[in-house]
Amino acid sequence: MVDERGKKSGERIAKAIARAGLASRREAEAWIAAGRVAVNGTVIDSPACNVSGADRITVDGAPLPTRERTRLFLYHKPRRLMTTHADPQGRPTIFARLPQDLPRLVSVGRLDFNTEGLLLLTNDGELARTLELPSTGWLRRYRVRAHGTVTQAQLDQLRAGVTISGIHYGAIEAALERVQGSNLWLTFAIREGKNREVRNVLGHLGLDVTRLIRVSFGPFQLGELAPGAVEEVRTRALREQLGAGLIAAADADFSTPVAPPRPERTKDERREAQKPPNHSWRIHEDDRPGKTLQRKYHGSRRDGARELPPGKARTGTLTDRKGRSVAVERHGQPPARDEPQQASRERRWEKRGRPQRGKHGRRRSPDRASGPRPRQPRGR
């Protein structure tokens, strides 16, 4: 839309989708590029589109849900969970572990796969974007267990910032808590939250991080929240902690009523939600023009299927190096034996240095002085 002064009014389409709680701005822009978003019945392919309340927006043919009250949740993220809605590698995600009665949430920033602790979740994508900006200035505090040695003087030098591999990290507050053998515990406070900032900075000091726990994000504390638990921040407390400045910057809405809980998803719907999104750069191989996956074969399989030797297939079992049984199928005729089975057995006895059997089937006993008397076969 265009106002009386010739300027575009309204807000960006990606911002409107983020406010509805469907996705973050970045995810909404990927949906637009994939042709999943339509405005007034017309599919758009560029996020450079302003919309207003009078426009009709649909995502995958479904109308954009009505914006609900801005809500914030505290979540204690366990280790070995991805902070994403769908992981291309199929790893478990935090959103698959959340209770089904919660609204569609987005995370304020991210925590690594092996990082645990406090993670903020909200149903307002614009609030999430505002809180994770370095200009907001909220302090993020961590407790770190690391292997190695470091002095407090080295940690104090981080207050002036540090540049590692061409990336500059701002002022860092670090303090040495205690030392336990070859391990030590630190407190680490940052304001920027760049990718793997804590691990990169401590690795620059020669420390190997073995455990990383975020204990606070701005005014919100992890406290006694159990791993995997979710707790909502009351609306009054949220307004007080955000303040007028952040509320205006995020255009948070605290007057709209809370939407009813979502119905519990079926098993198929949960499995479908775990699939990676079909972004424009991840479209299916059949729809990707001019590019197909090349499969490499070696040996006779390169020119065609390998011809199996004639004969009936014989099944068997082998054992690999770890003692596991492996089923095999043999083709062709079994190898012919050019000697009687009894002769082959006697040759094996000779190699092992054991006595052969005599005329009547008994083993020939060596001299009794050279060892104990051999045991007689049973029944004789």
Image (cartoon, helix red, strand yellow):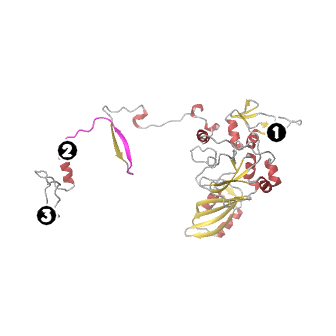
Q: 336 above or below 199?
A: above
- Residue sitting farthest toward the right: 4
The magenta span reads 322-343
Q: Does residue 349 appear anywhere in the picture?
A: yes
How far apart in space, not on screen, are marks 2 and 3 (Cα)?
A: 30 Å
Q: How many marks?
A: 3
User: Which is nearer the eye, 69 or 357?
Assistant: 69
- Residue sitting farthest toward the top: 41
Residue type at mark 3: give it: Arg
* Residue drawn at the location 59% of the way across and 34% of the way down: 284
User: Which is nearer the eye, 142 or 158?
Assistant: 142
How far apart in space, not on screen, are marks 1 and 2 (Cα)?
A: 92 Å
The answer to whether residue 341 is magenta is yes
* Residue pointed to by mark 3: 368
Mark with earlier residue (2, 3): 2
Residue type at mark 2: give it: Gln
* Residue drawn at the location 37% of the way across and 48% of the way down: 320
Looking at the rendered structure, which numbered label has been put on residue 10? 1
* Residue pointed to by mark 2: 341
Q: 280 above or below 169?
A: above
- The answer to whether mark 3 and mark 1 are in CB contact below 8 A is no
How far apart in space, not on screen, are marks 3 and 1 (Cα)?
A: 108 Å
Q: Which quarter of the image is occupied by the C terminus? A: bottom left
The answer to whether residue 354 is magenta is no
